[in-house]
Amino acid sequence: MAISAIRTLIIYAMLVAAMRIMGRRQLGELQPIELVVTLLISDLASVPMQDSGIPLFSGLVPIVVLIASEVLLSALMLKSPRFASLVSGTPLIVIRDGCPDRNVLRRLRMTVEDLSESLRGQNVFDLRDVQLAIAETNGTITVYPVAAKRPTVYEDLARLPPQDHGMPLIVVADGKLCDWAMQACGVTSVWIDRVLRAEHRTLDEVLILSVNGCKDYYLVPKEGGV
């Protein structure tokens, strides 16, 4: 009995350390690779807990291998956006100006009813209220409502009706171009090069470059480039 309790405590400590290493995402925010690793770890951890005949070291080795693999893949995804897209996919625009994209719905294997349920979960009951809806890589739907349906902020009091500048999206992240965001904002690499020249920056010096539908941009340089 005491041996089983000690084994359980050791495995418990190992799993807590694993979750700390993998990050603090909530379950609904896990990327596909993170969800797979989490499910596998939970399954592997139950075996040495229940069967004291299995050496503890043999039960911990697969968990350590999975953690190391996840950390390695995460590092590769940070270095290579193409690899990140291959593993986790890219966000997809499901609705634009109240009109669902049937091709994207087929690609996501999502029915209109599934889309309507996701919208209702965000208190959106009319497609005409949606300017942009994006299917994120973690499976959630992000909704950007039309100007008339957005929460009123102080700036809106000075200009009625509220102006619609479009949804800001990050087109450059950590020195890498985000193709899907560029397409959604209607900007090209030529336009980004022109902005960078005006800001006297190179692409590698940019941490974040976000752009809205009116081509208003916000640039955050890397610390080394300030």
Image: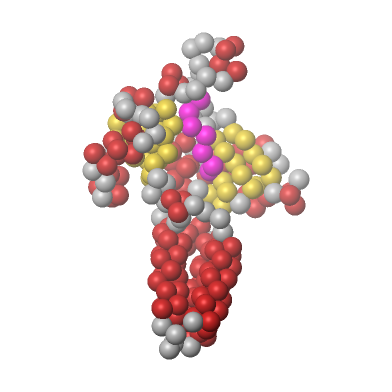
Q: How many marks?
A: 0
Q: Which residues are magenta?
A: 165-171
Q: In the figure, is residue 209 to the left or right of 135? A: right
Give 56 or 50, whichever is nearer the viewer: 50
Query: Residue at coordinates 75% horizontally, 52% vertically from top-left?
Result: 224
Q: Which color scheme did the rendering employ for the protein? A: secondary structure
Query: Residue at coordinates 24% horizontally, 39% vertically from top-left?
Result: 112
In the depicted structure, whether residue 193 falls above or below residue 20? above
Q: Where residue 68 sits: x, y (%)?
A: 54, 73
In the depicted structure, whether residue 132 falls above or below residue 137? above
Q: Where residue 45 sits: x, y (%)?
A: 45, 74
The image quadrant where one finds the C terminus is: top right
What is the quadrant of residue 94 in the picture?
Answer: top left
What is the quadrant of residue 75 in the picture?
Answer: bottom right
Extreme residue toward the front, this view: 1
Query: Residue at coordinates 33% horizontally, 33% vertically from top-left?
Result: 120
Instruction: Inspect the magenta stretch and tell me whether residue 169 lies in it.
Output: yes
Query: Residue at coordinates 36% horizontally, 29% vertically from top-left?
Result: 124
- Residue 154 visible in the current orientation: yes
Give 71 or 2, whichever is nearer the viewer: 2
Instruction: Inspect the magenta stretch and tell me whether residue 11 lies in it.
Output: no
Q: Where residue 212 sits: x, y (%)?
A: 52, 32
